[in-house]
Image (cartoon, rainbow, N blue to C red):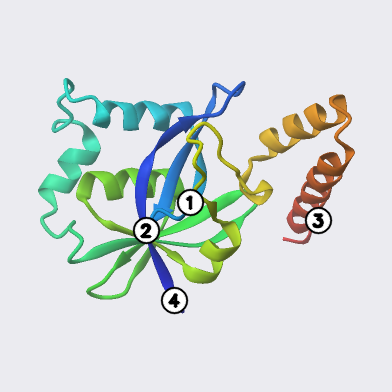
């Protein structure tokens, strides 16, 4: 299994969807990127850590990293290995004993940012999910299989309203696939 190393590029807001944001990651060459949906609370957490006027050393994630001296890239890394029901699945990998701890994707990115851990995505997943980094920083394509159910339903309503039936069909198919998966599992 190959893996692609990722870097955190930044946080972007979703136009018209103030309760959601996007954590943007790219490969090391910054030629392809992915976006991971996060909630407004996670946007706030990243905002705290990018504002140079705010001291975060006493916040819980920083305190926990500081009292665990092994929480470094020498001992740990983050691996994104799948997408299930619109959510990227992330693992905290202990490189010493190869134990895996599942994490919410946005929390994994925040931990990697704070502890300076390396981020990786399985190569096949990255190739399927990533899009080329475009010259426009204002627009970002997001695969529909990474949208929450709420976002999918809103996008479907908008596509129907705008009479974009091809997009509406793709969104409906994704919703049906998830419904089928949930009923089987």
The residue labelled by disc 4 is: 2
Q: Residues within 10 Å of mark 1 (few under 14, many from 20)?
A: many
Mark 1 vs 3: CB contact within 8 A: no
Query: Rounded to the nearest whole Å, what is the CA distance between mark 4 and mark 2?
Result: 17 Å
For the view shown, which residue lies furthest in the bottom direction? 1
User: Quick check: 78 above or below 15?
Assistant: below
Of the two numbered discs 1 and 3 in the rendering, the one whose residue sits closer to the viewer: 1
Q: Residues within 10 Å of mark 4 (few under 14, many from 20)?
A: few
Residue at disc 4, secondary structure: loop
- Give the percent coordinates (x, y) of residue 155: 74, 33
- Give the percent coordinates (x, y) of residue 123: 49, 70
User: Looking at the image, is mark 3 or mark 4 earlier in the sequence?
Assistant: 4
Q: Residues within 10 Å of mark 3 (few under 14, many from 20)?
A: few
Of the two numbered discs 4 and 2 in the rendering, the one whose residue sits closer to the viewer: 2
Query: Rounded to the nearest whole Å, what is the CA distance between mark 1 and mark 4?
Result: 17 Å
Using the image as rendered, state which of residue 137 and residue 49 is in the foreground. Answer: 137
Mark 4 vs 2: CB contact within 8 A: no
User: Looking at the image, is mark 1 or mark 4 earlier in the sequence?
Assistant: 4
User: Looking at the image, is mark 1 or mark 3 earlier in the sequence?
Assistant: 1
Labelled disc at residue 33? 1
- Give the percent coordinates (x, y) of residue 81: 49, 64
Query: Rounded to the nearest whole Å, what is the CA distance between mark 1 and mark 3?
Result: 29 Å
The residue labelled by disc 2 is: 29
For the view shown, which residue lies furthest in the front direction? 135
Query: Rounded to the nearest whole Å, what is the CA distance between mark 3 and mark 2?
Result: 38 Å
Question: Quadrant where the C terminus lies?
Answer: bottom right
Q: Residues within 10 Å of mark 2 (few under 14, many from 20)?
A: few
User: Quick check: 173 above or below 77?
Assistant: above
User: Looking at the image, is mark 4 or mark 2 earlier in the sequence?
Assistant: 4
The residue labelled by disc 3 is: 180
Of the two numbered discs 3 and 2 in the rendering, the one whose residue sits closer to the viewer: 2
Mark 1 vs 2: CB contact within 8 A: no
């Amino acid at each position: 299994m190959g893996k692609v190393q990722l870097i955190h590029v930044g946080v972007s807001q979703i136009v018209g969807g103030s309760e959601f944001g996007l954590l943007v990651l790219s490969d090391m060459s910054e030629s392809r990127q992915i976006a991971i949906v996060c909630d407004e609370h996670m946007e706030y957490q990243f905002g705290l850590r990018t504002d140079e006027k705010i001291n975060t050393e006493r916040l819980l994630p920083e305190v926990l990293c500081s009292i665990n001296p092994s929480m470094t890239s020498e001992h740990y890394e983050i691996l994104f290995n799948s997408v299930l029901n619109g959510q990227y699945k992330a693992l905290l990998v202990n490189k010493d004993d190869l134990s895996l701890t599942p994490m919410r994707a946005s929390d994994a990115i925040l931990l990697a940012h704070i502890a300076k851990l390396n981020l990786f995505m399985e190569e096949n997943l990255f190739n399927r999910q990533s899009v080329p980094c475009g010259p426009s920083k204002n627009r970002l394509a997001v695969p529909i299989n990474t949208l929450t159910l709420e976002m999918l339903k809103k996008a479907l309503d908008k596509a129907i309203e705008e009479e974009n039936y091809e997009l509406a069909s793709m969104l409906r198919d994704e919703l049906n696939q998830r419904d089928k998966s949930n009923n089987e599992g």
